[in-house]
Amino acid sequence: MIHTVLKQLFSISCVAVFAFSSCKDQTIEPSKEQVLSEVQFGNQIWSGENLSRVIFRNGDTIPYVSDAAEWEIAGREGKPAWCYFAGDESKAGLRGKLYNWHAVHDARGLAPQGWHIPSVEEWRILFQTLISSAIVMHQKN
């Protein structure tokens, strides 16, 4: 049982990492148009959806790249970019969009208003919460 739960958590976390989910800022209430669902784990509130934005918070466009060569050039030149997982637009609903480091860390803000890209510490807390929950579930069975 615990092996299955941990395997599912790992699968979910891999998708979330690659899609760059957002954490809710505790001081700002986001617009319901920007994030349709929320999921709470312990004291954290996470977006229930993969990030799928094509503009920064300030309205500037995030450039789309369609192939590996363009992705590499954007990274080398320090330019933000996004693409579809494996270049497959048909899986956008399932996987969201992938963003390069420059888009994620851009000062214009990748996450919607009221949200932010999670820090390493926030990911650590999430994993600890999920693993603790899985252990408690296992002990009850």
Image (tube, helix red, strand yellow):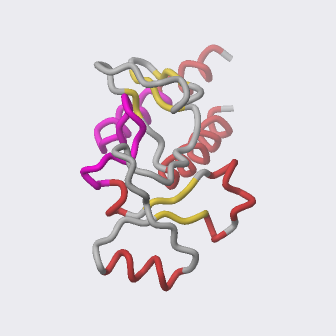
Q: Position of residue 10 (x, y in %)?
A: 56, 46
Residue extending farthest top? 140
Question: What number of labels is visible?
Answer: 0
Locate the C terminus by quadrant.
top right
Q: Is 120 above or below relative to 48? A: below
The quadrant in which residue 63 appears is: bottom left
Q: Is residue 100 above or below residue 55?
A: below
Q: Position of residue 131 (x, y in %)?
A: 49, 31
Asked which quadrant contains residue 79, the reply is bottom left
Q: Nearer the viewer, residue 135 or 17?
A: 17
Residue 115 magenta-highlighted: yes
Q: Position of residue 135 (x, y in %)?
A: 54, 25
Q: Is residue 104 above or below residue 21?
A: below
Task: For residue 55, say whether it is visible.
Answer: yes
Left or right, 85 with reference to 16: right
Part of the protein shown in magenta:
105-131
Could you tell whether 131 is left or right of 43 in the image? right
Quarter occupied by the N terminus:
top right
Q: Is residue 95 left or right of residue 105?
A: right
